[in-house]
Image (cartoon, rainbow, N blue to C red):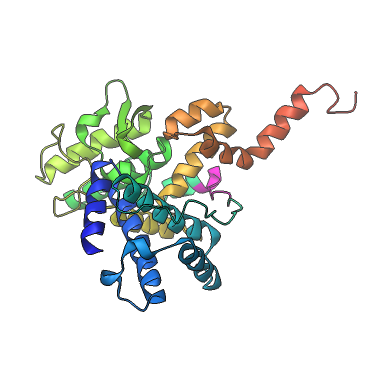
Amino acid sequence: MEKILQQYSQYLLAGNFSEMTRIAYLGDLEQFFIFAASRHGLKMADLPIAQIDGLTVRAFVHDLMLGGVGKRSVARKLSSVRSFYKYAMSENLVSENPVQLIKAPKNTPNLPRFLFREHVDKLFMSPAATTQPPTASHQPPDLSPKDEFVFWREQVILELLYGSGLRVSELVALNFGQIDLTNKLLRILGKGRKERIIPLTDLAARAVRTYREKRELMRMPLAEPAAALLLNLRGGRLTTQSVRRILNDCERKAQLNQHIHPHMLRHTYATHLLDGGADLRSVQELLGHKNLSSTQIYTHLTKDRLRQTYMKAHPRAKLPD
């Protein structure tokens, strides 16, 4: 079993799956195979995958539901198992697919959380995250090179997450060579290594320029095309966990009293675009969504704008004057 999982891990790597997806798939599979082995009184390493049938898969799903695992998580774990057996069938490791007739539990999609515009303003005006250069009203005038570096790095993070709608994985993977400051464009490699070109706001372009200057004063690695954009204080590439910690700090200083995570700023970006009149197809392209259905969920967040459009456009929406 261990050898098969190692081979499957290499298969995922070769298939342009992200590192986070690969880790999630392998974790789900390990949980499934431990469960399947226990039904046969075996250890996972000794379990022949040919002995696993549809009843085992159904029992696994049932056990997850009884354990209080949410429908969305159950569906994801089942998807991981289904992906593995698709691979196993292609490699002739099994003759039958036990997941083929198993359906995931129906899930009512949760509307994504987003920030209202006044909350975004407060976030950007927090002491460590203002869109203005450091002044006496926001930052001490005698910031050290280290503090200025941290200050402008936070600017870049906020501007790119909210201003360009990047995924946190795209943000930390960004290199200087993907940024066109002259034309204010970003070249992003998204899920499945799919490339998309998205606009860079004026404020984001200014933040990147200033951050680059502060970074050079810190004598960190030069801002060459292949160099990482966001660095930690040790000169290494910033991690997704570090970005989350930085956002938590910004939220605390802005006193928003709600948990802010990177994807929430991406949700906010999409919602505010639609509120501002952007069409759904354009937002789909900007977000890098493969299917329009992934973007349509944001239309549920823009009911007020849709109602205003209806009241203005429909001839019988209002009583005559």
Residue at the location (40% across, 54% down)?
80
- Foreground of the two, 174 or 79: 79
Q: Position of residue 2 (x, y in %)?
A: 23, 63
Start and end of the magenta stretch? 110-119
- Foreground of the two, 38 or 267: 38
User: Is 221 on the left or on the right of 157, as rendered?
Assistant: left
Q: Main secondary structure of the magenta part?
A: loop
Which quadrant of the figure contains the N terminus? Answer: bottom left
**46 inside magenta stretch:** no
Is residue 305 visible from the viewing direction of this image? yes
**118 inside magenta stretch:** yes
Is residue 135 visible from the viewing direction of this image? no
Q: Quadrant of residue 206?
A: top left
Q: Quadrant of residue 171?
A: top left
The relative height of residue 273 versus residue 268 in the rendered view (above or below) is above
Name the outermost residue toward the front: 95
Q: Position of residue 93 (x, y in %)?
A: 30, 53
Residue at the location (49% across, 26% down)?
282
Q: Position of residue 31 (x, y in %)?
A: 37, 67
User: Is 159 on the left or on the right of 14, as rendered?
Assistant: right
User: Is 140 on the left or on the right of 58, as rendered?
Assistant: left
- Foreground of the two, 58 or 240: 58
Name the outermost residue toward the bottom: 41
